[in-house]
Amino acid sequence: MWHRFMSDHYRKLVLLPLAACVSLTLLAAGSYTDGRGNLKTGKLSLRQRDVKRNYYMYVPKKYTPRKRWPMVISAPGTFPFDSSPGTRDAWAKIAEELGIIICCPDFDSATGLLNIKADQKKLASDSQAVMAIVREVRSLYNIDPNGIAITGWSGGGYPAHYIGLKNPNVIRAIIGRTANFSEDLVDDESARKARHMHVFCFFAKSDLAGIPEQNRRANFWYTMRGFLNFEIREIPGGHSKNNRLAADWFIKLLKTHPTARIQASTLSGQAPLTVNFRAVANDPDGRVATIIWQFGDGGVSIHASTSHTFTEPKLYNVFLTVVDNDGNREHAQIDIDVR
């Protein structure tokens, strides 16, 4: 039986038990639907009851369930200078124009005053709440499983980086918009498991004190931990939200980069262990040109379907690179536990 691992970030969401999906639908239906039972569009104010967390959405008025829609989770800056409803409102025009569903939960950790080491519980709680909200939204709206990003402005950068790095099988991209960052947000093992993600950080020429330096440190941190799809940019201006820049970058990613996922016949077993692998890859604007497997023991393959034998007891990181005809790269990874 094939085990599926998706760098297009939807395994945990797609494979929800049917009963759980029904439960989520019943839970949210009263808030999501109008008097005729139709899903609402425009500005929505909602509450996820399991985690007792408010969130604010913008659903384009042209929404139809007949196609998949990208979704951006957006964390606000430090209160009282910003808020989740205000963040939703600031995204509305861009979301309508570009066809993006916006989701803005309340955060406890979206503050430039966050004590990273002391406030790990706040970050973890926010991550749990955001994932519950994502599951709820996906139970009703047709969200593209390859098209979920998380972004944060200013102090919202802390939870955006943390939640993205902790949930790399759900979230495809992290976008820091003139945002805070710390090397202490997650440990190296969390970073290793997320290094196939896309990350885009930008800061302004006349930004708030400390923001440019934190983004330069983010550049070093992500690069040293092997994030191959990391991008950093200095932009003109000051400490602005720059929602349009983030949205344009994300839509370009979705329109130009291939998607990739790994299918493996088994995830663990006794040495010597032979595993059959299959790369499932697609390109939205061209064709897949190259597939490269790295099996974690020096072995490589360039075939979409391949087998590999692991001879020594060890945890092996299998890393897949997919390159399209324009040179754009997508990555996926899984671990094989050989005992």
Image (cartoon, grey):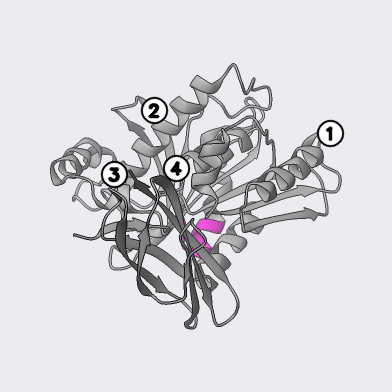
First in residue order: circle 3 vs circle 1: 3
Comparing labels 2 and 4, the label whose residue is closer to the camera: 4
Q: Position of residue 179 (x, y in %)?
A: 69, 40
Question: Residue under circle 2?
Answer: 53
Question: Residue under circle 1?
Answer: 209
Q: Amino acid at mark 3?
A: Tyr
Comparing labels 1 and 4, the label whose residue is closer to the camera: 4
View extreme (right): residue: 206
Comparing labels 3 and 1, the label whose residue is closer to the camera: 1
First in residue order: circle 3 vs circle 2: 3
Question: Residue under circle 4?
Answer: 167
Comparing labels 3 and 4, the label whose residue is closer to the camera: 4
Q: Residue at x 41, y 45 (%)?
A: 314
Examine the rendered structure and indicate whether residue 331 appears above or below residue 301: above
Question: Residue under circle 3?
Answer: 32
Crowdedness near tag 4: few (<14), some (14–19) or many (≥20) residues, C-alpha within 10 Å: some
Q: Secondary structure at mark 1?
A: loop
Q: Amino acid at mark 2?
A: Arg
